[in-house]
Structures are given as structure tokens and as C-alpha cells.
Image: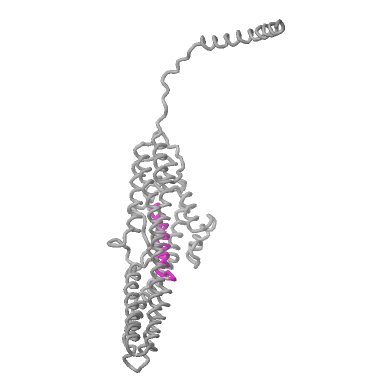
Amino acid sequence: MAGIQVSSSLLLSKSLPSLRCRREIVGARVNAPRVHLGVVSHPKLPSRYLVDEMETRTGYSIARHDTKSSDDPRVIAKLYAIMEAVADRVEMHKNIGEQRDNWNRLLLTSINAMTLSGATMAGLAALAAEGSPLMALKLSSIVLYVAATGLLLVMNKIQPSQLAEEQRNAARLFKQLRVQIETTLALGKLDINDVNEAMEKVLALAKAYPLPLLGSMLEKFPSKVEPARWWPKQRSKQGFVGKIEGNNGWTRKLEEEMRQVVRVLKQKDLAEYIDLGSKALKLNKMLAISGPLLTILGALGSSFVGTTDCSWPVMMGVVAGAVATAVNSLEHGGQVGMVFEMYRGNAGFFKLIEENIMSNINEKDVERRENGEILEMKVALQLGRSLSELEQLAAIAECSEEFASKLF
């Protein structure tokens, strides 16, 4: 017991100094002078809240833009609202494009199945004995041919492959517009003109590629082929005749180079794709008329099977159905309507480059133009060329047969 008391007293004596040190430290902390920092204000970040809200609604991951404090928060809010609408339109056009591509495949498969079945029944009717079997096969063949004709008329009218291409183009261009708005936000120095410009681009795109079929569907067989237009019209401006050397990246040499590029675009690239579009349109018209006409001939041939000893009714009923299947497969399986829309869209792409260049050249105030060096780089990239190749193209524009674009 004595040993235990001695060890406990030793432990208490060792722990007392540490306890005294802790008390001194605590006292020093309690008695430390207080520093008054005043009211701490946190900066308001309305744009960050809008980005978070938009990411939650659309599911897209959006780059965070450090907008300057001098920018109007209402302008920023409007641009983010437009970007939210644009993101929604991208999904809408993407989904509808997939739906209309499914229409093309499913309708083509159904029409070809009905046409071949009608031709087969017309051939079997010629081998059948007189009476009920002959009548049943004839009526079945006629019904299938008539049904295939009705579906084919609808399909040729709306051209599902062309509708799908329109929606794919719209989805791509709305994505491009969204990136442009993000770039505008990132650069800062925003004003109401940026909002108005974005709104005009959205409305122009909506007009160029409408969603509904009834009432606002684009004409699938226009009388004249024109480039697709999905951008707002540029306002006419007076030419500038003053000195431009070194102003905003523009020089006389660069201006002349851009004029030569526009000349090549108009005379070669744009004219070539308008011509290709016209040829694709003529082919599509011919196929769209031939398909229903052949199925009607097949129905007429089937109706005369068994009424005469001649072989022409069964020949018409079978051969017309086979040829109609080949014609429909070429038109809709080969997606001739989509090819026409692709050529029309490519011509519109060159027209946009041309108008963008000319709107800058015709701008009276050089400082209000887009920077000349940046514009030259953009045009070179859009045409699939380097800057040196673009200069070379402009130098030999009058004596060369080379096209401006190397992309398509």
C-alpha cells in the first residue's frame, strides 16, 4: 500500500506543471485583445447563380465566365436566358431529327413490302383458276397497290430524309450559336446590342428550320434553288474611302485579298453547289412522280388479270411493282432529298462567308469592323486553308480554276 501511495504522489507532482501551463495558455487566449473587423460584405455574383440555375435546368455543363463588374447584370441575365432557350432548342431539333429519320426508314420498308406483296399476288392470280381464288388475289393486289400509292404520295410530299437533314443542321447551328454567346460572355464589355443580336440569330434560325410540318414546312420542290439562309440580314452600309492602313488590323492589301476571295466564292463554289442542288432537285422530282405512277399502273394491271387471254395485265401488275420498288429505294433509300438539302446548306455556308466579308468591307467606320487579322484567320479556317494558302488563292483568283473551299 505504501508503494502505491508513493507512485500516485509522484504522478501528481509530474502532471501539475503541465496543468499550470495549460491554464496560462487558456488565460492568454481569453485575455487576448479583440480586433474589430467591421461588416464583411460578400460580392454579389448574379451571373454565377444564373449559370448554376441553367446547368440544373438543362443538364449541360457550362463554362464559368468572370464577367467584369462594369457589365450590366440585366444584360448578363438576358444572355443566359437566351442561352438556356438555345440549349433547349438543340435537344428539340436533335430528337425530332431522329424521329423523322425513323419515319424515312419505316415508311420505305412498309411501302416496299406492300408493293412487292401486291406484285406477287398479281402473279399468283394469273395462275389461279377462275372463281373465288382469282378474285381474292386480284382484290388483295389492288388494295396493297392503292395503299402503297397513298403512303408514297405522303412520303414524297414531306420528304422525311430532307426533314431529318434540316433538323440535324438546325441542331448543329444552335450549338454553334450557344458557343458564340458563351464567347461573348467570356470577352465581357456587354451591352443591349449583344442581346438583340443573339435574339435576331435565334429567330432567323427558327424561321430557316421550322419544327412543325403543317403550315410552315419548307417547300421540298421549289421552282428555283437558292442557298439556305439561317442568319439575320445585314444592313446596307456605305463604303469607306479614307485611309485604312493599320486601322483595326485592316490594310488595303487585306481588303483586296478579301474581295478576291469573295469573287472566287461567288463564281465557283457557290455556283457549283447551286448547280448540284438543281440537278438533285430534278432527279428527286422525277423519282417522286415515277413511284406513285408505277404503283397505279400495277393496280390497273392487277384489276385486268383473268379478264383477257393476253399477258399484258399480269406483266403490268408484276413488272410495275418491281420497278416501283427500285424507284422508291433509290429515292428514299438513297436519300435524294437529304442530298438536295445538303447542297443547299453548303451554298448557304458560302453565302454567309461572302456576306460576312462584304459587311466588314462596306463598313464606313473601320474601328467598327471586325479585326482584319481575326477575320482573315476565320475565313481561312472556314475554307480549310492556311493563311498563306488564302493569300495565294487571292493572288491567282483571276487565272485559276481552283475552288476556294478545301473542305467540301
- Answer whether residue 152 is magenta in the image: no
Q: In which quarter of the image is residue 259?
A: bottom left
Please say if 119 is above or below 11. Answer: below
Q: Which residue lies furthest to the bottom in this view?
A: 309
Q: Residue furthest left?
A: 215
Q: Position of residue 186 (x, y in %)?
A: 44, 41
Q: Where is residue 53 in the image (x, y as percent from the top left)?
A: 39, 40
Residue extent of the magenta highlight: 333-360
Please say if 116 is above or below 367. Answer: below
Q: Which of 43 and 110 is in front in this view?
A: 110
Q: In which quarter of the image is residue 184?
A: top left
Q: Position of residue 226 (x, y in %)?
A: 36, 65
Horizontal relation, residue 388 to residue 259: left or right: right
Q: In which quarter of the image is the N terminus?
A: top right
Please say if 388 is above or below 3. Answer: below
Q: Quadrant of residue 346?
A: bottom left
Q: Which of 30 and 80 is in front in this view?
A: 30
User: For the image shown, how many numbered marks are present on the structure?
Assistant: 0
Looking at the image, which residue is at 38% across and 71% down?
281
Q: Nearer the viewer, residue 217 or 232?
A: 217
Dominant secondary structure of the magenta stretch?
helix
Q: Position of residue 407 (x, y in %)?
A: 50, 61
Q: Residue furthest right?
A: 3
Task: Tell me which colouring the rendered structure shows.
Answer: one colour
